Amino acid sequence: MTRTGPAGHPAVLELRQYTLRPGRREELIELFEREFIETQEETGMIILGQFRDLDDPDRFVWLRGFQNMETRREALSAFYGGPVWAAHGPQANDTMIDSDDVLLLRPLPADSGFVVPSPSERPQAGAAAPDRFVAATLWHFPPGRHDGTELIRHGLVPALNSTGPASLAVLTTETAHNTFPRLPVRTGENVAAVFTSYADENAHRRHLADVLAHPLVQDGILSDIERAQAAAPQSLRLAPTARSLIR
């Protein structure tokens, strides 16, 4: 089945987590926001968000979206085979130790993905970084099993949304074949990911405390999720960069 999302609501997403050479993150962010946003979007993809990982000064996290897997192949082929990447890709690659930590994701359900502002609303280069905090939690379940993702979708997410800001997106693994093998993605994954934005980290902490008092959580939804897990969840504490649409 080919999943296709409307404009501004991508049906296929990449969550990309890069490990950088020590002290090179600001160099990559400056290069990325100057050279790699509009030029990627001109090929048909949308650059959703760029983030500093608050737990690792040498970690850069970003998201991009596509209408479907075929447009992903076309857009990536055009960009990575084009003049901008030829000119600036070597400098970007030189900042990186590892760029292969990539999850291919889709909204869960189809209407729960990021609603993306128009690129015309993106701040211009040189703007100040927003004073926002984005939390992302990734739960890992055994391949082929849907009970864990259903617990997230029907149990935990309603508790989250009723006690604090609504989630920006609820995502799960896109199992379609990687249509652009030049860029590897993690395979054999079964992930549920929830992204939420806050005014600051204290607001996030207050939200988590309220979630723990929610009746669904008191009834054991977290214990059910823990039993369904294949590995411990990953929590990302993220600071949006100046030109990030997600903030």
Image (cartoon, rainbow, N blue to C red):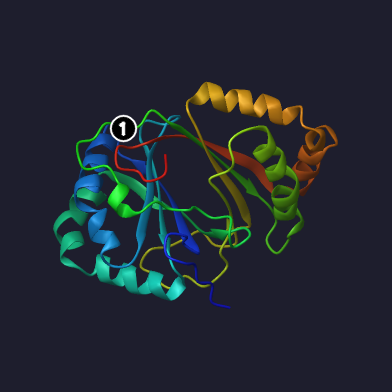
- Where does residue 204 sit, x and y in percent of width and height? 56, 28
Asked whether residue 94 appears in the rendered view, the answer is no
**Does residue 34 appear in the picture of this structure?**
yes
Measured as percent of width and height from the top left, residue 241 is found at 33, 37
Question: Measuring 63% from the left and 41% from the top, which residue is drawn there?
Answer: 233
Residue depicted at 35% across the width and 54% down the height: 118
In the displayed orientation, state which residue is furthest to the bottom.
Answer: 1
Under mark 1, the amino acid is: Ala
User: Residue 159, image x and y in percent?
Assistant: 72, 39
Q: Using residue 44 as the reference point, say whether residue 54 is left or right of it.
A: right
- In the image, 37 versus 190, the foreground residue is 37
Q: In this view, does 4 lie to the left or right of 126?
A: right
| Residue labelled with disc 1 | 129
Q: Is residue 117 left or right of residue 168?
A: left
Total count of labels: 1
Most extreme residue toward the right is: 219
Task: Give whichever of 88, 33 is nearer the camera.
Answer: 33
* Quadrant containing the N terminus in the rendered view: bottom right
**The quarter of the displayed image where residue 246 is located:** top left
Quarter containing the C terminus: top left
- Pointer 1 local density, CA inside 10 Å: few below 14, some 14–19, many at least 20: some
| Residue 42 x %, y % | 25, 64
Residue 20, placed above or below residue 54: below
Residue at 24% of width from left, 46% of height from top? 33
Q: Which secondary structure, mark 1?
A: loop
Residue under the point 19% across and 36% down: 126
Query: Is the residue 195 above or below the residue 75 in the image?
Result: above
